[in-house]
Image (spheres, rainbow, N blue to C red):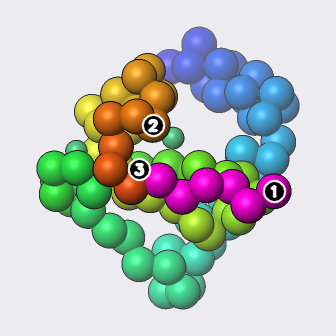
Amino acid sequence: MIESETRQADWRRANPQKYDAHLAVQRALKSGSLARGVCEVCGVEAVDAHHDCYDQPLQVRWLCRQHHTRLHHYGEDMFPMTFLCPA
Ligand SMILES: [Zn+2]
Ligand SMILES: [Zn+2]
């Protein structure tokens, strides 16, 4: 999948802070300082870490692919919990 790899590299260049936050989560999961959760909406165990605030790379919300996509498409309003960026 060369095309998607290229797109990922482009995304990384365009979003270095997001990429750093993503890496911080991966590191924390590996070291055990962060525990993987379940989707906060439906409880599914296959989840992505969603960042409300990239200034706090380890403050994440766990969302399944479906609800993660939905959050990015429709915004925060449909979600009962919001962590606001303190900045
Ligand atoms: Zn879900
Ligand atoms: Zn997200």
Q: Amino acid at mark 3?
A: Asp
Ligand 1 position by quadrant: top left
Q: Quadrant of the C terminus?
A: bottom right
- Segment colored magenta: 82-87
Q: Which residue is mark 3?
A: 48
Side (left or right) of 8 relative to 39: right
Q: Which residue is mark 2?
A: 76
- Magenta region, mostly helix, strand or loop? loop
**Residue drawn at 49 percent across, 86 percent down:** 32
Q: Earlier in the sequence, mark 2 or mark 1?
A: 2
Q: CA distance from mark 2 to mark 1?
A: 18 Å
Q: Earlier in the sequence, mark 3 or mark 1?
A: 3
Q: CA distance from mark 3 to mark 1?
A: 24 Å
Q: Is mark 3 within 8 Å of ligand 2?
A: yes
Q: Amino acid at mark 1?
A: Ala
Give the label on residue 87, or none. 1
**Residue drawn at 26 percent across, 62 percent down:** 38
- Is label 2 in contact with label 1 (beta carbons under 8 Å)? no
Around disc 2, counting alpha carbons within 10 Å, would you say few (fewer than 14), some (14 to 19), or many (20 or more)? some
